[in-house]
Amino acid sequence: MQKKLDEPDIETLAKKDIFAKVADGDWYQYAKEPQIQAIVKASTQAIQRINQIAVTDTQEALRQIHALAPNIANDVEFYFPITNIEHPNNLYIGEGTFINLNFTILSAGKVTIGKNCFLGPNTQLYTPNHHPRNKVLRRAGWQYDLPITIGDDCWFGGSVIVLPGVTIGDNVVVGAGSVVTHDIPSNTVVAGNPAKPIRYE
């Protein structure tokens, strides 16, 4: 897992475009970035509308979620409701993947999910970080996003949480209720909080 514990260089960051900051994993202040706020608010409203549609028409809801998140394969299946996908353009999902209800992605970091994955209900993928030791930075709202990558043929039990910067290999099984804090190699079964290997395939 990537880590970024240095203090933000405020003078240098002030000259950098917000989307470049996000892509590079640089610090930014969400409350002072209206473009990022607008994306989150619009996507949240869109997800809420799609969930309402799904109550009576799941096929139309699926069509709309695919339109909202353009980088997911045509046959990716979602069960509704979806909790949130804050930055739909930063979500990439491969063919044959199934995502159960209450799926959550926060915030702006790129999230890649491979082919033929099965993600259980209440899967939560978190890309933002705040400083773990500097309360002044936290009060000021400084954060940065790190990408999450999930390989092909992965299976998550219910209520799995994946933290920022984590890469999960292919054919990984993550036990229900696990919190994945570090990279997981391919062909591994992990479980727990923090998730630890319990078997290698």
Image (spheres, rainbow, N blue to C red):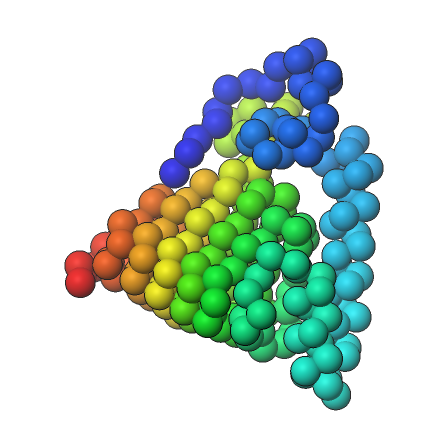
32 lies left or right of 175:
right
Q: Residue farthest to the top? A: 11
Q: Splitting the image into 4 quarters, where does residue 142 fall?
A: top right
- Quadrant the C terminus occupies: bottom left
* Front position in the image: 50 or 64: 64
Image position, residue 138 (x, y; %) = 63, 30
> What is the quadrant of residue 101 in the picture?
bottom right
Residue at 71% across / 61% down in the picture? 68
Image vertical order of residue 94 relative to residue 183, above or below: below
Give the mark count. Answer: 0
- Please identify the quadrant where the N terminus is shown: top left
Work out whether 15 lies above or below 147: above
Measuring from the top left, give residue 122's x and y in whole percent. Answer: 52, 67
Residue 55 spot, x, y in % from top left: 73, 84
**Residue 191 in sight in this render:** no
Residue 121: % across, % down: 50, 72
Specify whether 142 is left or right of 146.
right
Residue depicted at x 48% and y 62%: 94
- Whether residue 153 is visible, yes or no, is yes
- Outermost residue, left side: 200
Q: Residue at x 77, y 79 (%)?
A: 53
Query: In the image shown, does 77 or 138 lie closer to the viewer?
Result: 77
**Please, is residue 193 above or below residue 19 in the view?**
below
Q: Is residue 43 above or below residue 166?
A: below
Q: Determine the residue positioned at 56% across, 45% down.
A: 110
Closer to us: 18 or 141: 18
